[in-house]
Amino acid sequence: MKKPVKSKTGKIAPEDAALFRATVGEVQPLPEQNRITPRPAPRKPLLDRPATPVAIPDTLSDFAAEKVLDEFLSNGLSRMTLRKLRRGTWPIQDSLDLHGNNTDTARKLLQEFLHEATQRNLRCVLVIHGKGLNSQSGEAVLRKLTRHWLTQHRQVLGYCDAQPRDGGSGAVLVLLKSNI
């Protein structure tokens, strides 16, 4: 099939347009259907924050082991819990994107995010740390540290790689303790 030739002005040549019309024939527009107009995503509810911000202690260590765990489960929990997390039994209720942050900022953001998530009684959250493809050293620094920090946090029951649609190995699904 011949590719349509565009002129210098970017318009399709008249003979190509005529050929297209002859091939396609008479066209009728589709009838108007009941369409739902897209709405912006709902905003997260604002917490009633105290006048003075709560100081969140920085208890997470940056000294991670060489090997990073792809999955983590707290002691005493069934492996079935991790399987359910992997399969998406708990819907993702909130997410945090750590891309482009240095390690100190990422650690503080993660601690604040987990604190707020537990205050809001969220069970499953997504933390996006990236795969480290654009890292200067070629190493996934935030991936390694984020997973290390999560193993140290007292509210984290377990974590695993996110589904491919949610970021795959560049993100982690985190299961939090219930305050109820």
Image (cartoon, rainbow, N blue to C red):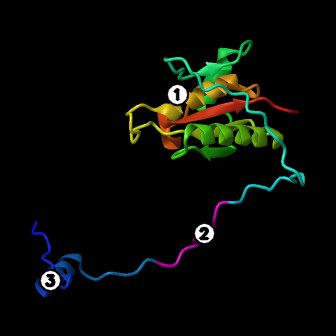
- Chief secondary structure of the magenta portion: loop
Numbered badge on residue 58:
none
| Residue 148, x across and y down, in percent | 60, 25
| Nearer to me, 103 or 5 | 103
Q: Quadrant of the N terminus?
A: bottom left
Q: Quadrant of residue 61?
A: top right
| Viewer can see residue 174 | yes
Q: Which residue is mark 3?
A: 8
Query: Which badge, 1 or 2, comes first in the chain's sequence?
Result: 2
| Residue 60, x across and y down, in percent | 68, 27
Numbered badge on residue 36:
2
What separation in Å lies between label 1 and label 3 (alpha carbons)?
52 Å
**Residue in view at x 42 percent, y 31 percent:** 139
Element type at mark 2: loop
Element type at mark 1: helix
Q: Residues within 10 Å of mark 3 (few under 14, many from 20)?
A: few
Q: Which residues are magenta?
A: 31-41
Contact (CB < 8 A) between labels 1 and 2? no
Residue 30 vs residue 173: left or right?
Answer: left
